[in-house]
Amino acid sequence: MVAIADIEADIEEYVDYDLVGSLTRANAFIRACRLWLAFSADSASNQSSSMTIGKQYVQDMLRRAEQFAARKSGNGGVRFLGPGRHFR
């Protein structure tokens, strides 16, 4: 069984996927967010701090990560638009 603390550690570890531009890290972040949403209560708080993570916040982060992954994998539309080969 996966502990919610381990899932939160993965979220914290891979949250920089967009800063490093890594599709692999984005996919790991997406997986961690989905697991967190599946196994968490309405909100979870870190016992060692006053930080509280809400479901809406994680859903927003998940949506942004999925958009990043779609763009990075080439499924996000036009990647390059410029003049054709024979443009003068």
Image (cartoon, helix red, strand yellow):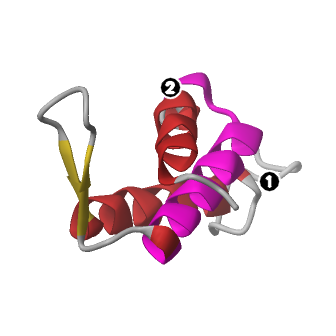
Q: Residue at x 25, y 27 (%)?
A: 48
Does residue 76 appear left or right of residue 61 in this picture? right
Tell me if 4 is positioned left or right of 53 in this view: right
Give the answer, above or below, for where 17 lies relative to 76.
Answer: above
* Residue at 68% from the left image edge and 48% from the top image edge: 28
Q: Amino acid at mark 2?
A: Leu
Residue 4 lies, with reference to residue 56, above or below; the image says above
At x 59%, y 48%, the residue is: 29
- Across and down, in percent, residue 58 comes to 34, 60
The N terminus lies in which quarter of the figure?
Answer: bottom right
Q: Which mark is residue 19?
A: 2
* Within-10-Å neighbours for mark 2: few <14, some 14–19, many 20+: few
- Residue 3's place in the image compared with 15, above or below, is below
Image spot of residue 81 (x, y percent): 65, 54
Say which amino acid is labelled 1.
Gly
User: Is any atom of residue 71 visible in this view?
Assistant: no
Q: Which residues are magenta?
A: 19-38
Q: Which mark is residue 84?
A: 1
Q: Is residue 48 left or right of residue 30?
A: left
Which one is closest to the eye, mark 1 or mark 2? Answer: 2
